[in-house]
Amino acid sequence: MKRLIVILAVVVCGLGGIALLRGQGEQIGKPPQQNEDRKPMPLPGVGGGKLTSQGELTIDGSAEVKAANDCATLFLGVNTRDPKASAAVNKNGDAMRRVMKVLRDAGVGEKDVRTVQFYLSQTWEHHKDGSSKMTGFAVSNTLSVEVKNLEKLGSVLDAAIEAGLTDVSRLQFKPQDVAKQTMEARGRAVQDARRKADALAAAAGYKVTGIKSLAEHSGIRPMPMYAGAMAARDAGGANVTPGWSTTRLQVAVTFTIAPKAAEADDRLGR
């Protein structure tokens, strides 16, 4: 009986050892769990770059273009008063016609002149005792005038004042070809984004293969920034400083990328 018990004990121990070794062998041969969950290494997040899981890299690009202002927009007004409304209107019309003739003689085209404001209002006299008395009527007429020859700007203003101009409410300078300036800024912004994408992709062993989407950032428009960078011009009368205009523009470009090794395999037909 004792011999039988010993034999059974040896058999049980042997079977347990075999099971233990089999379990250890399975664990030794099984790849680590972390290997199954490995993810591709992301590109370094430098310069606003963002890599998606689909092999896309989104980059912001920006640019600014400066141009000398060679065009001016003036807001010229004529104000007249008279006890009678009709007389105030007539006086205003006569003065404005003289101003318009001066503008035409200076080479300003009809399409560069337009009325932006005209109103007729009553005039009142206020007394110290708090009472008021209507004294007549006032007429205000304002023109928007675009002058493309800045050499004549000062003399035009002087002649218009002599002709009856009573108010210069605003003077703005800008380049004549704003659309060209904007297109140049847009092209430079895209080139800036491409340079950044090439640098980031190369640093991580990738290469840019194409463009998926391109757009200007929402809410961002070309903004003219004026600065008195040019010397003031004495145009025979009024002293004016055209300055420079800077258009700033920003774009977002999504590039498609691929590992350089993968591209080499494709070329070899692997």
Image (tube, rainbow, N blue to C red):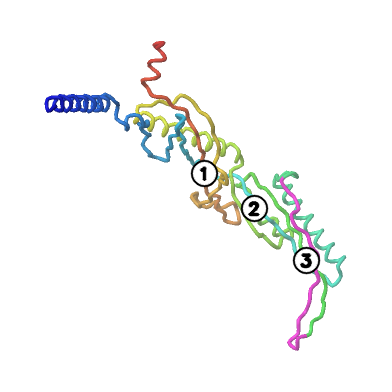
Q: CA distance from mark 3 to mark 2?
A: 23 Å
Residue type indicated by callout 3 = Thr
Magenta region, mostly helix, strand or loop? strand
Who's the residue at 63% across and 44% down the image? 149
Q: Nearer the viewer, residue 68 or 66?
A: 66
**Rendered view: 242 above or below 32:** below
* Image quadrant assignment for residue 93: bottom right
Q: CA distance from mark 2 to mark 1?
A: 33 Å
Residue 119 on the magenta span: yes
**Rendered view: 28 above or below 182:** above
Give the image location of residue 10, x and y in percent. 15, 25
What span is in magenta?
A: 112-130
Quarter of the rendering occupied by the C terminus: top left
> To which residue does mark 3 refer?
80
Front disc: 2 or 1: 1
Residue type indicated by callout 2 = Ser
Residue type indicated by callout 1 = Arg
The 10 Å Cα crowd at callout 1, few under 14, some 14 to 19, many 20 or more, is many
* Image quadrant assignment for residue 134: bottom right
Left or right, 181 with reference to 120: left
Using the image, tell me which numbered label, if any, was put on residue 225.
none
Left or right, 227 with reference to 46: right
> To which residue does mark 2 refer?
155
* Image quadrant assignment for residue 177: top right
> To which residue does mark 1 refer?
248
The 10 Å Cα crowd at callout 3, few under 14, some 14 to 19, many 20 or more, is many
Give the image location of residue 6, x and y in percent. 13, 27
Q: Earlier in the sequence, mark 2 or mark 1?
A: 2
Q: Earlier in the sequence, mark 3 or mark 1?
A: 3
